[in-house]
């Protein structure tokens, strides 16, 4: 088999090893032409050299100043891997819906060249080319889009795909958001990569202040209602301690009934009745119709406090299981469901 | 191996040449078609002219599609040869690694290996081999004695072993909570997309010796089919031959299963088709099963890539959709 051409890595190497004499002509073609003309062989023209030297120095100066643009950059991603990527990536593949949302939130969607299936927010994302689902990525489509950076998530994207992309000389930067803090870190890190640090910092500041506001509300009450958050319909699946939803429930002043070491524990109906939740929340994997059916299902057990007080709710799952700035929206929704009394007092 | 007669050699060469032509066409098709449009012309350009028009097309062709096509070929060759060997040893036209539960046992071993955190090569492969050897032993014990010749008891024990294996697989899956679950499920149904050229090379290095061993024993397989007494009188050490073939076959089947998951019925379709075309001589059937199985699997994988509108489906779906009706047809015919 013949060795495939790998142009990309070649020019990366040439730039990091011998900086000014790069072969890349994509970004500064005019400057390169000037440099190639520097050797002057005709002795009759030697006197002109001094005159030429000044514009040449200017050109070189400009080149050194802009050369930062072409430089390969070494960064450490959220998994501690060292990734070499171009300083100003222009063709990005978001390998999970959450990454797509973060890039849109940073206003950098013009760099986004491919997204995964189910990338449905904001709706503009639906128009971008699809590269498979985030657990089963279509390598061929990714390569065909010629990305200069792939943004991956640790929880979901299979490691084999990441390794193959790297063996194809496509840089992969992975984030690993596991809670609010690391979601904000991921936003900041992606902002740094995409030259949108200011926007990222503003985004994180507003997230922080909104979380603080919720905290200041919740602190007024000591009551912590028992919440069951159902993310799976059949079998009944709750959320363990190490999930975003658990963090949200606790921040919103509730007690997560399904907390524990298993991230997504399964429950029987009997166990749920035994836990007697005061608030029952179901995520909308499907439409309202299904919710009515599930609600009718639970309504047969009026002994359950949540049924008795009619506190069964359906929420948009995308606000709760995607590590994006929209998690704060989820938090605000949740606190209104768990502590409606805090909002009544206000009025 | 016993190819002293030049007529046989000539026939072998002719058959191999024809099938290789077929295989070659399958390979060209396999690397020409994919989820992105880079048509046959750029593939031919890349094959003939050396330099492809752009590096992206050549990356897709040589680093994504080519390893996959090679892998599909290897897997198809292994599975159809596995079917052929089992049909000869057990003297049962319906024997096949998947139906017998050999693949299922390998899958149980492989999933255990994955869940225990072993690496794909050596670790998981050894677990898969242990699993398939275990099921093989189970099948041989269950249908021991004379009953092994009867297809019903063999099939029944295979069905039971399969049911048992899939119960264990479901059990292991229900214990798994994290994101590996989705991967394992996709892998179970036969996923050829994940290996790169280096792994395909290692796999080929492990499997090619098995092909040679089976070919070396192909004349003994002919004699085995004549019956135990006959074979013994012709100087075949039945016990040794059976043991060598069983171990070799379950080794190569389990190695492929540990890499690509369960692909059923390949070992049924190809050996039967070729036997219809070429007659019962294993000295010809063994090499033609290798080449024909490779071509068949490449086409099946191609269908799996092309048929769905979005994404791709596991190749195991295609092989089962073609193979299962074929199995019923064979069962009906052999029942007469």
Image (cartoon, coloured by chain):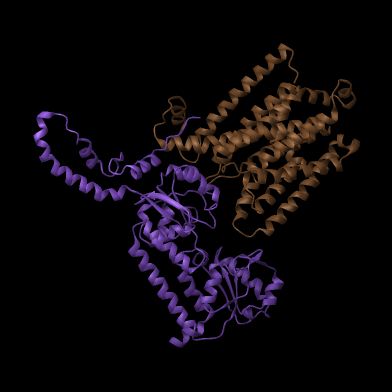
Residue A152 horizontal side relative to residue B53, left or right: right
Residue A274 lies, with reference to residue A135, above or below; the image says below
At horizontal 41% and vertical 44% (from top left) the residue drawn is: A146
Instruction: Indicate the position of residue B34 as horizontal and vertical percent values.
Output: 50, 38
Residue drawn at 28 percent across, 44 percent down: A27
What residue sits 71% from the left and 11% below the top? Answer: B6
Query: A31 left or right of B328?
Result: left
In screen coordinates, is B221 left or right of A55?
A: right
Residue at (86%, 42%) from the top-left corner? Answer: B141
Q: Position of residue B112 (x, y in %)?
A: 69, 51
Q: Is residue B83 above or below residue B126?
A: above
Q: Position of residue B309 (x, y in %)?
A: 52, 45
Note the chain letter of the purple one: A
**Residue furthest out toward the top:** B6
Using the rendered view, name the quadrant where residue B86 is placed: top right
| Figure chain in brown | B
User: Could you tell me if residue B317 is visible in this image?
Assistant: no
Camera sees residue A277: yes
Image: B336 above or below A69: above
Relative depth, front residue between B248 and B15: B248
Quadrant into which the C terminus of chain A falls: bottom left
Q: Quadrant of residue B262?
A: top right
Tell me how many marks there are.
Answer: 0
| In the image: residue A50, left or right of residue A240 | left
Q: Position of residue A119 (x, y in %)?
A: 47, 56
């Amino acid at each position: 088999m013949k060795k495939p051409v790998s142009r990309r890595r070649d020019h990366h190497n040439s730039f990091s090893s011998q900086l000014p004499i790069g072969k890349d002509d994509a970004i500064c073609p005019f400057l390169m032409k000037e440099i190639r003309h520097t050797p002057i062989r005709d002795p009759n023209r030697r006197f002109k050299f001094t005159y030429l030297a000044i514009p040449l120095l200017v050109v070189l100066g400009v080149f050194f100043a802009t050369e930062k643009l072409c430089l390969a950059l070494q960064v450490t991603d959220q998994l501690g891997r060292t990734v070499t990527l171009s300083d100003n990536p222009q063709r990005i593949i978001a390998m999970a819906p959450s990454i797509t949302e973060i890039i849109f939130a940073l206003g950098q969607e013009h760099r986004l060249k491919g997204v995964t299936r189910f990338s449905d927010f904001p709706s503009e994302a639906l128009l971008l080319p699809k590269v498979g689902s985030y657990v089963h990525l279509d390598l061929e489509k990714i390569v065909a889009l010629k990305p200069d950076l792939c943004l991956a998530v640790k929880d979901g994207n299979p490691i084999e795909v990441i390794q193959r992309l790297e063996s194809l000389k496509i840089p992969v930067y992975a984030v690993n958001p596991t809670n609010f803090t690391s979601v904000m870190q991921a936003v900041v890190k992606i902002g740094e990569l995409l030259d949108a640090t200011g926007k990222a910092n503003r985004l994180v500041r507003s997230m922080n202040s909104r979380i603080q506001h919720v905290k200041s509300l919740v602190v007024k009450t000591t009551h912590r209602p028992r919440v069951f958050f159902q993310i799976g319909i059949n079998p009944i699946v709750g959320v363990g301690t190490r999930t975003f939803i658990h963090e949200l429930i606790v921040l919103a002043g509730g007690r997560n009934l399904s907390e524990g070491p298993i991230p997504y524990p399964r429950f029987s109906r009997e166990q749920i009745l035994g836990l007697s939740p005061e608030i029952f929340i179901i995520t909308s994997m499907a439409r309202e119709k299904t919710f009515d059916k599930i609600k009718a299902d639970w309504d047969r057990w009026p002994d359950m406090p949540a049924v008795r007080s009619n506190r069964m709710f359906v929420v948009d799952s995308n606000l709760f299981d995607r590590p994006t700035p929209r998690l704060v929206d989820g938090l605000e929704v949740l606190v209104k469901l768990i502590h409606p009394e805090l909002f009544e007092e206000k009025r | 191996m016993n190819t002293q007669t030049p007529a046989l050699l000539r026939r072998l060469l002719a058959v191999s040449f024809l099938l290789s032509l077929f295989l070659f066409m399958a390979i060209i098709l396999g690397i020409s078609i994919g989820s992105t449009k880079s048509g046959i012309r750029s593939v031919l350009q890349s094959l003939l002219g050396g330099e492809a028009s752009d590096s992206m097309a050549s990356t897709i062709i040589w680093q994504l599609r080519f390893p996959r096509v090679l892998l599909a070929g290897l897997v198809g060759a292994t599975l159809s040869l596995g079917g052929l060997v089992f049909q000869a040893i057990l003297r049962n036209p319906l024997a096949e690694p998947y139906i017998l539960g050999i693949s299922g046992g390998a899958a149980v071993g492989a999933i255990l290996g994955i869940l225990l955190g072993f690496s794909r090569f050596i670790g998981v492969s050894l677990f898969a081999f242990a699993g398939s050897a275990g099921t093989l032993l189970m099948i041989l014990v269950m249908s021991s004695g004379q009953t092994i010749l009867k297809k019903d008891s063999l099939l029944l024990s295979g069905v039971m072993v399969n049911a048992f294996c899939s119960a264990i697989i479901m059990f292991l899956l229900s214990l798994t909570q994290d994101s590996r679950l989705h991967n394992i499920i996709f892998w179970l149904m036969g996923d050829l997309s994940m290996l790169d050229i280096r792994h395909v090379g290692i796999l080929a290095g492990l499997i090619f010796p098995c092909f040679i061993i089976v070919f070396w024993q192909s004349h003994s397989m002919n004699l085995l089919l004549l019956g135990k007494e006959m074979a013994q009188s012709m100087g075949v050490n039945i016990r040794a031959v059976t043991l060598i073939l069983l171990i070799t076959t379950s080794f190569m089947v389990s190695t492929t299963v540990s890499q690509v998951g369960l692909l059923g019925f390949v070992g049924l379709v190809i050996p039967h088709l070729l036997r219809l075309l070429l007659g019962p001589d294993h000295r010809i059937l063994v090499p033609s099963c290798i080449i024909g199985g490779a071509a068949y699997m490449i086409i099946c994988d191609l269908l799996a890539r092309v048929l769905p509108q979005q994404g791709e489906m596991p190749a195991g779906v295609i092989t089962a959709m073609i193979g299962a009706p074929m199995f019923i047809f064979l069962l009906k015919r052999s029942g007469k």
